[in-house]
Image (tube, grey):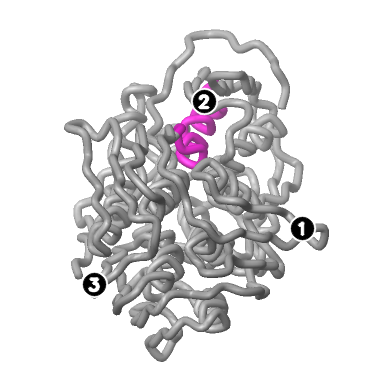
Amino acid sequence: MTAADVSGPVLNAQIPGSKSLTNRAVLIAAGARGASRVRAPLVSADTIAFRNALTGCGTRVESSPLSEFWEVTGTGRGPVGQARLWCADAGTAARFLPPYVATGRGTFLVNGSSQLRARPQRPLLEALRCLGADIETSPGNGLPLLVRADGLTGGELTVDSSLSSQYLSGLLMAAPLMEHGLVVRAEALVSSPYVDMTVTLMRRFGARVDVRPDGSLRVEPGGYTATDVVIEPDASTASYVFAAAAVTGRTVTVPGLAAGSPQGDLRFVDVLEKAEARVTVGDTATSVTGTARLRGGFAVHMGDISDTFMTLAAIAPLADAPITIHGIGHARLKESDRIAVVAQNLRACGIETDQGDDWITVHPGEPRPARLACHRDHRIAMAFSVLGLAVPGTITLDDPQCVAKTFPDFHAEMRRLFPAYVYPYAVNETTEEKP
């Protein structure tokens, strides 16, 4: 990243709190002794589903009147009792809750939407069974799953992390509640910055986590201590306003997202800088300024920041040469097959694309009007909304409100920042499943 000066009118974006930090902090606070305050939490469909699941486990979570903070009162141990836990579409809930409830005592049914039930869980369940957990699953080894919890003694294991880093994060966060702690090795780890984020938050709550010479992680038993934590703006969500700045020639600043952030997705601005946007990452904020053109003709590995690859792919047609994104094979197993959906939507706009198992190439072109499929994927909707801003009248979305998963006010904020932004209206919008 460079420290280039920015010029022109500066737009301060109001980006909600990080989903990844919010859900990790709330879960760790639930296992801590005493009351913790999670300040500036993200309030969205995913985090509400996660919070409701924790209250279903018996954790007390109280919100201030305007959700300036959530106060979480933990007991210093895993949950006790019986509960049905509905995760809705929240992948973090589906991967973090089973290890947590397995450290408790009781019977817990974990379930979610059809979209979430299609997402893989096998590596996590295999790891938990190696630790002695009693888990009954559906035939596909995913949700719904029943955990008959009688505590976990802990131990040593290797986790297949090639599909998601969330399996490892879920096990790590439960480890201080295990009788003997945990030594865990990640095999073929993707999205490693999210594991670093997990460890940072665990230590903030008093957990003892060490990286051993062989790269494995040792988590000591002893639980967590209640503390207060401030949730910074979501770096993945900020990628959309940063990309919008790059393609409109404006300057957008996100206060509170700055150097030293534990969120790996802030590195998306490095990619924009490669495309000749000007970037400033300071001590209190990050700014991006668009220049006269969007440069292409490069390849970039985005495996560690794969939640932002769609943002780049959606604006890549506006570049002066092809852009190839690789290292993103695990993105096929997210809310949608993101590589296939991005390619499908770009082709609907008349843009040439090529793809492989873990890569996509987007060629320059003039997008034509099209109605695009979101597949209930919030990041697909937000990424292509940026293309719609850059080329007005180009797109409508079949499910524009799926952005509520992580940024309910996304369309309003885009219109506030960029008056030319047109709400990508669709006649038939999807509805959420209920438990």
Residue 297 falls within the magenta-colored stretch: no
Earlier sequence position, callout 3 versus callout 2: 3
Secondary structure under tag 3 reads strand
Do we see residue 292 in this rendering? Answer: no
Q: Amino acid at mark 3?
A: Ala
Question: Which residue is under mark 1?
Answer: 212
What is the number of callouts on the image?
Answer: 3
Question: How many angstroms separate mark 3 from mark 2 (CA)?
Answer: 46 Å
Residue at position x 65%, y 11% in the image? 5
Tell me the quarter of the image containing the N terminus: top right
Residue identifier under label 3: 83
- Separation of marks 2 and 1 at Cα, in angstroms: 42 Å
Q: Residue at the location (23% across, 63% down)?
A: 56
Q: Determine if the magenta segment contains residue 247.
A: yes
User: Residue 7: in sight, yes or no?
Assistant: yes
Between circles 3 and 2, the one closer to the viewer is 3
Quarter that holds the C terminus: bottom left
Q: Are marks 1 and 3 in contact (CB under 8 Å)?
A: no
Residue 17 falls left or right of residue 432: right
Q: Residue at x 33, y 29 (%)?
A: 413
Please tell me which residue lies in front, 15 or 176.
176
Magenta-drawn stretch, dominant element (helix, strand or loop): helix
Upstream in sequence: badge 1 or badge 3: 3
The label on residue 245 is: 2
Which residue sits furthest top?
A: 8
Residue 396: image location, x then y, percent: 33, 47
Residue numbers of the magenta segment: 232-249
Closest to the observer, 406 or 40: 40
Quarter assignment of residue 433 = bottom left
